[in-house]
Image (cartoon, helix red, strand yellow):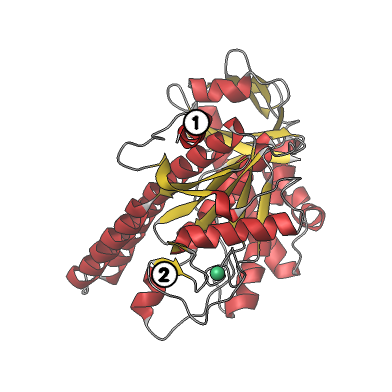
Amino acid sequence: MLVRGVAFRLRGELPSEARFLLEDFRLAVNNAIRAGLQARVTSRNALSKLAYKDFRQAHPRMYSQHLVSAFEVAGSVLKNCRRRLRKSGAGRVPYVRRLMMKAGNQAYKLDRERGVVDLPIRAGCHVKLELRVSDYHRRYLDDPSLTLGSLTLLPDRVIVTFRKEAPRPYVPESALSLDTNERSLDGVFVKGYQARAVKAEFHDAATIQQRHHDRRKRLQRKKAHDRRTSRRLCRREGAREHHRIEYRLHQVANAVISFAEDQRSAIVLEELKGFKTRWNRELNRRLSLWPRRKLHQIIEYKAQWRGIPVVKVDPRYSSRTCPICGRIQDSRMGAEFVCECGWHLDRHINASLNLLQTAISKGMAGGLRFNPGAFQHDVMMILYDPVTGARSEPNGTSCISEAASEVTAR
Ligand SMILES: [Zn+2]
């Protein structure tokens, strides 16, 4: 089962009843957390046994399904706290500050046509929350294959989860093999006997990271006398950075995904493993795997949602192997991969050829065949470019058939 959360802004203010419910919910969660810590339990049922009665007496009219889901939230907070404790040995007593509540799919109703949530507060009292619905939201609301999951209510928005059965991946007719680098995805697109270089850039992610890093450094210097303010401002910077980068990663992933879907491609990616941390902290930060790993997660998730096959390949030696003669070079070289057999190619694209060959030789990419010799050096297809924000070629087939006819004409 695949799950996707979709956020809706509210039309108008949150009704005051709903606001009280949020406050009661937070109270219930924090009570249950305290009870759970004392009794050293984290499961929803155990928490419910412990805390239900007391809270019920104090708040006799709260809808009981909401109460149960408060125990569930408390349980997951406790589990996270326990994990942190095990990992770092330190931890404070958890306390939920943020106003939020969660309702299971039995505990609310959503009018998918009009975009109105009916949320029970207590016996005889319901609130209606009107959602702002855009085309993006319509795609989820109008799709009858999606069922409703839980709902999360926040003071200014509502997050509805939609669920669907994972579609069976199609049998690929082509392959898109991508080598993940610090600032771009570089690779090949292979269809029939033709292969072409492709590129999707996200170099601005690194620029943004650098800029926010500098800004945080400056803030820390400026607010050195006031740690509390410094921390608060740095956290805000961090959140901004996170949003900005994630937005860009989604754009890149969308470009890759829609290209692969148009071409009925399998997507071949490398398995990103942890890398050795070095003594140089600056370098560690700069090479942080986070954006790349996140990008892979987004691509994999979106592909699963749409039934696009994704193949993960062990990248060992992929940057040092010659795809023609199979020789493994001793060390990494410059921007160009050069082999004694005469083969030479851009280092990143060469790596992606090797990834693809591994996937094919292990039978992971369906019945695709591919001969690296058919690789065409001339024109690069740009899947995504942050400057134009879109693909330069809306349809890859046209350009490939053009190239093919060019070759035969010669
Ligand atoms: Zn060679």
Direction left: furthest residue = 222
Left or right of 56 on screen, residue 301 = left
The front one of 203 and 113 is: 203
Q: Residue at x 56, y 49 (%)?
A: 374
53 and 171: which is toward the camera = 171
Question: What amino acid type is highlighted by mark number 2?
Answer: Leu
The Cα atoms of the two marked residues, 2 and 1, are separated by 42 Å
Q: Residue 372 appears in which quarter of the rendering?
A: bottom right
| Residue 22 vertical placement versus 322 (above, below) | above
Tell whether 343 sits left or right of 282: right
Q: Position of residue 67 (x, y in %)?
A: 71, 42
Which residue in the structure is indicated by mark 1? Answer: 405
Q: Quadrant of the C terminus?
A: top left
Note whether 112 is above or below 305 in the view shown: above
Quarter of the figure that contains the N terminus: top right
Residue 157 percent location from the top left of the image:
49, 33
Horizontal and vertical percent position of residue 93: 57, 68
Quarter for ligand 1? bottom right
Point out the tag, 2 or 1, that comes first from the N-terminus.
Answer: 2
Q: Which residue is mark 2?
A: 287
Residue at image position (75%, 59%) is 362
Sort mark 2 into few (<14), some (14-19) or many (20+) by Cα contacts within 10 Å.
Answer: some
